[in-house]
Image (spheres, grey):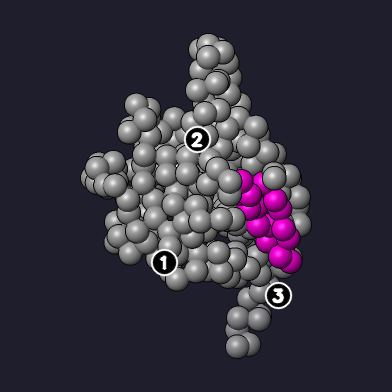
Amino acid sequence: MPATSQRHADVMEITLDWPEVRNALGPAEGRQLRESLEAAIEDETIAAIVISAKGKSFCAGGNLPEIVRLAEQGPEAVQQAIYGEFQGVFRAICDSPIPVISAVDGAAVGFGCDLALAGSATFIGSQGWIAQGWIKAGLIPATGGTHYVVKRAGQQVLWRLLAADKVDGPTAEAWGLAIACDDARKAALDMASKLASFPRAPLKAVTKLAGITELQEHLSAALAFQTGFITHPDFPVYAQKLLSR
């Protein structure tokens, strides 16, 4: 089965649907997920994306038998697959002009942990947990996991996560990595639906600003956005609605 896409009004839910391998990804699955993300991002009517999964695992990481077969083809084939298919998923998430929310209702290990933490928000349900996992296979988080953890919670949490066998929702929330809940899919879809109800241009602007960490660059971009919004013909309408409450 491919990664499946299901529309909920202005929200696109992309579901990992390889339960027979606990949603572990090889190059082909990475390509399918990347293409699903790119299609949702290119659809101007979509306001938010939710990544969920079927089965007991959110994503068990890379499909190791597939990775071993890839390794047999040599360094060039490995590099092309990592850059094009695996890192391609994360470039799509990073470049998304709309929020990407992960719903973790099972194990998210290695690649799955990176996928859980790469987007705008992460919900971890009562049956969900994350683990870095890469280093146990003699690997590193080549899809950006180190960056996502440090960006959200700092270097101390990076090492705590690396040393932990698994991190549940309440612990991840205490560390600043995720939001704990009972049902991650429901919580993610609820948030996405709420975000989709907001005016589209400011929502995209906030998504863009969230990725700008340098203050002066952030303020400069915010100035340009805000000037455009205040001088837009729609602004008096929004203002009047707020004043009439």
Query: Mark 2 vs mark 1: which is more N-terminal?
Result: 2
Q: Which residue is mark 1?
A: 126
Q: Is residue 217 in view from this perspective?
A: no
Kindly give the residue lying farthest to the front in the view shown: 20
Type of the residue with mark 1: Ser
Q: Earlier in the sequence, mark 3 or mark 2?
A: 2
Q: How far apart in space, not on screen, are marks 3 and 2 (Cα)? A: 50 Å
- Using a 10 Å C-alpha cutoff, classify the residue at mark 3 as few (fewer than 14 neighbours), some (14 to 19) or many (20 or more): few
Q: Is residue 52 magenta?
A: no
Residue corresponding to mark 2: 62
Q: Residues within 10 Å of mark 1 (few under 14, many from 20)?
A: some
State which quadrant residue 126 falls in.
bottom left
Quadrant placement of the N terminus: top right
Quadrant placement of the C terminus: bottom right
Mark 2 crowdedness (10 Å alpha carbons): few <14, some 14-19, many ≥20 = many
State the image coordinates of residue 118 (x, y, percent, origin top left).
48, 45
Residue at (24, 42) in percent of width and height: 163
Describe residue 176's horizontal placement relative to residue 183 as left or right: left
66 vs 174, nearest the viewer: 66
Q: Position of residue 107 (x, y in %)?
A: 44, 52
Q: Nearer the viewer, residue 142 or 203?
A: 142
Image check: 7 left or right of 120? right
Q: Which residues are magenta?
A: 3-18
- List x then y, in percent, for residue 192: 60, 64
- Residue annotated with mark 3: 237
Mark 1 and mark 3: Cα distance apart in space: 42 Å
Quadrant assignment, res 139: top left
Relative to residue 9, is residue 220 depicted above or below? above
Identify which residue is drawn at 60% across, 84% down: 243
Using the rendered image of the protein, determine whether residue 24 is visible from the camera's viewpoint. yes
Is residue 17 a member of the stretch shown in magenta? Answer: yes
Residue at disc 2, secondary structure? loop
